[in-house]
Image (spheres, grey):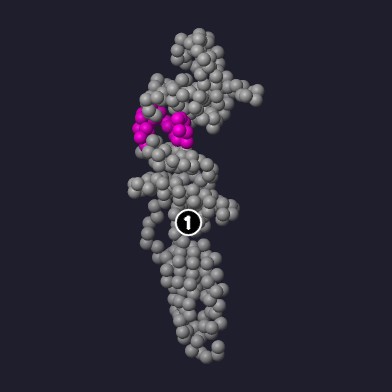
């Protein structure tokens, strides 16, 4: 305890290995008081605990090398995505630990990650860890065939665990795709299969909701009305797309792609049921999509059949089962 042979002479007697993102200066800050001290007075367990408090360090091993040197072995965390933190971009690992971008560290790799949103430093680590598990399952399923599809994603929104959303680049723009919470690869393939056709019919396409088994919701960018589409086999032979001219004041246009053969199978999530009664036919359900409910002038409804013409252009209303106020959807998809 008093022999000078066991005194750590300088900081050069403390060796570090395994640190790529954490600088030597950051590590020496923990051992600064140990220089010129007897090596047996340094608590290895305390130094290890202090090292593992650094965000980038997952595990650390501290060893004495007699007579007067120390060696520190570092196991760093592996980032899996960029994360938006206020006005700057950081990194996050698979366990939800938020990491700062490395500065002046000996990092040679170039990151190619999507940006993750929907997690925050204000949330507990357990919440962030659960959402990153969803991210891991999402990207693993997309990359399962070895196609590295996750590298095509520019942003992944994890704010709703039941609806994973991703921004997918498409030429000079990006499209927001709703994937739900399962069948990620199948929904991605269906999206890519029909994207060209949807783009041709709806050039202002901005969002595609793939969560429903028998229906796809297309959302347009704010602006002029959506073009009228007579029909499309984008979702198979049993599916048909029909729309009416949109209202000029409508900030967001949405078109529902739905099979005609099974009108009662439409999902009730984010849809407003509208009942129409054509002459000499049983009631048929159609769906409407809108973020804001407001009146639709009768002249904006384009008659599709003689049965509709017989209704004398009466405005279509949405009837709630709870006798709530009436709404007028800006987009109606006719069967």
The 10 Å Cα crowd at callout 1, few under 14, some 14 to 19, many 20 or more, is some
Image position of 135 with respect to 75: above or below: above
According to the picture, the residue beneath numbered tag 1 turns out to be 93
Which residue is at a point 43% across and 67% down the rendered structure image? Answer: 19
Quadrant housing the N terminus: bottom right
Assess whether residue 202 is covered by the magenta stretch: yes
**Residue 62 within the segment the image draws in magenta:** no
Q: Is residue 226 visible?
A: no
**Image: magenta residue range:** 192-217
Image vertical order of residue 184 relative to residue 62, above or below: above
From this viewpoint, which residue is outermost toward the bottom? 3
Residue 142 seen from this side: yes
Question: In this view of the protein, which residue sits in the foreground, 84 or 118?
Answer: 118
Q: Is residue 146 left or right of residue 221?
A: left
Query: Is residue 159 placed above or below 125 in the rendered structure?
Result: above
**Which residue appears at 48% of the width and 40% of the height?**
180
**Kind of element beneath mark 1:** strand
Give the residue displayed 37% in from the left and 34% down from the top: 195
- Percent across and percent down for residue 18 are 42, 68
Q: How many marks?
A: 1
- Residue 270, given in percent of the width and then of the height, sits at 54, 31
- Seen as rendered, the residue at the extreme right is 323
Give 258 or 86, whichever is nearer the viewer: 258
Q: Is residue 84 above or below residue 102?
A: above
Q: Is residue 257 left or right of residue 38?
A: left
State the residue in front, 85 or 268: 268
Q: Position of residue 183 (x, y in %)?
A: 44, 41
Residue that appears at 52% across and 80% down: 35
Residue 211 position in % (x across, y down): 47, 36
């Amino acid at each position: 305890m008093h022999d000078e042979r066991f005194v750590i002479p300088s900081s050069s007697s403390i060796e570090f290995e395994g640190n790529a993102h954490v600088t030597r200066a950051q590590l020496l800050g923990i051992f600064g008081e140990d220089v010129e001290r007897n090596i047996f007075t340094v608590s290895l367990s305390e130094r290890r605990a202090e090292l593992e408090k650094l965000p980038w360090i997952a595990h650390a091993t501290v060893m004495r090398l007699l007579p007067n040197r120390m060696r520190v072995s570092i196991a760093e965390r592996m980032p899996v995505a960029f994360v938006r933190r206020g006005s700057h971009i950081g990194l996050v690992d698979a366990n939800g630990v938020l990491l700062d971008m490395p500065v002046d560290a000996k990092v040679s790799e170039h990151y190619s990650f999507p940006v993750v949103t929907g997690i925050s430093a204000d949330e507990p680590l357990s919440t962030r860890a659960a959402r990153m598990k969803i991210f891991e399952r999402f990207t693993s399923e997309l990359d399962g065939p070895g196609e590295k599809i996750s590298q095509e994603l520019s942003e992944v929104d994890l704010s709703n665990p039941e609806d994973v959303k991703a921004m997918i680049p498409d030429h000079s723009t990006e499209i927001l795709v709703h994937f739900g919470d399962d069948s990620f690869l199948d929904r991605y393939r269906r999206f890519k299969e029909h994207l060209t056709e949807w783009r041709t019919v709806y050039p202002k396409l901005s969002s595609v909701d793939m969560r429903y088994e028998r229906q796809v919701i297309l959302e347009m960018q704010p602006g002029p009305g959506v073009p009228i589409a007579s029909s499309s086999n984008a979702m198979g032979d049993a599916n048909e797309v029909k729309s009416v001219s949109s209202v000029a004041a409508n900030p967001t246009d949405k078109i529902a792609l739905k099979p005609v053969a099974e009108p009662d199978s439409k999902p009730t999530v984010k849809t407003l049921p509208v009942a129409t009664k054509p002459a000499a036919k049983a009631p048929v359900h159609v769906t409407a999509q809108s973020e804001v409910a407001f009146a639709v002038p009768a002249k904006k409804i384009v008659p599709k059949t003689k049965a509709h013409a017989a209704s004398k252009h009466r405005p279509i209303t949405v009837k709630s089962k709870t006798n709530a106020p009436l709404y007028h959807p800006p987009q109606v998809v006719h069967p």
